[in-house]
Amino acid sequence: MRFSESIKPISYLKTHASEVVRDVSNNQKTLVITHNGEAKVVLQDVKLYEKTQESIALLKILALSGKDIKRGNFNPLQKSLKNVDKKISEFKRAQNEVQS
């Protein structure tokens, strides 16, 4: 992304709103909107925003997992896999009960 093309004054947004929204949406762009020469808001495609939020959530999970590992707060792989298998079996059993 070229910052020189992604920074626009609010006056540009006011006069070209439909064009800006279409461009941001179609090209998954991010624009910085300035007011009185200062960056004030970011205009971003909603799909790109969602991807960014998902990435942040994953990074938080990784950070928390790292802290748990440092504290020794984790299960061995075999135990974790058994727990997953147990949850899958319970889910399948519940689904069969619902269908019956």
Image (cartoon, rainbow, N blue to C red):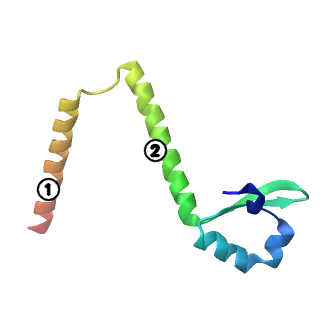
Disc 2 marks which amino acid? Leu
Residue 4 at what x, y percent from top left?
77, 58
In the picture, measured across the screen, residue 71 lies left or right of residue 12, that is left
In the picture, measured across the screen, residue 82 lies left or right of residue 59, that is left
Q: Residue at x 45, y 26 (%)?
A: 67
Give the distance between the C-alpha atoms of the residues marked 2 and 1, in whole angstroms.
Answer: 28 Å
Category of crowding for the residue at label 1, using alpha-carbon neighbours closer than 10 angstroms: few (below 14), some (14–19), many (at least 20): few
Disc 1 marks which amino acid? Lys
Category of crowding for the residue at label 2, using alpha-carbon neighbours closer than 10 angstroms: few (below 14), some (14–19), many (at least 20): few
Residue 32: quadrant of the picture: bottom right
Q: Residue furthest left?
A: 100
Q: Quadrant of the C terminus?
A: bottom left
Which one is earlier in the sequence, the residue at label 2 or at label 1? 2
Q: Is residue 84 positioned above or below 38 on the image?
A: above
Secondary structure under badge 2?
Answer: helix
Judge depth for marks 2 and 1 and give the one in front: 2
Residue 27 at what x, y percent from top left?
60, 69
Q: Residue at x 81, y 54 (%)?
A: 39
Q: Quadrant of the N terminus?
A: bottom right
Residue 72 at what x, y percent from top left?
35, 20
Is residue 32 visible in the rendered image? The answer is no
Q: Residue at x 91, y 58 (%)?
A: 36
In the picture, measured across the screen, residue 56 lies left or right of residue 29, that is left
Q: Which residue is the site of mark 2? A: 58
Q: Which residue is the site of mark 1? A: 92
Secondary structure under badge 1?
Answer: helix
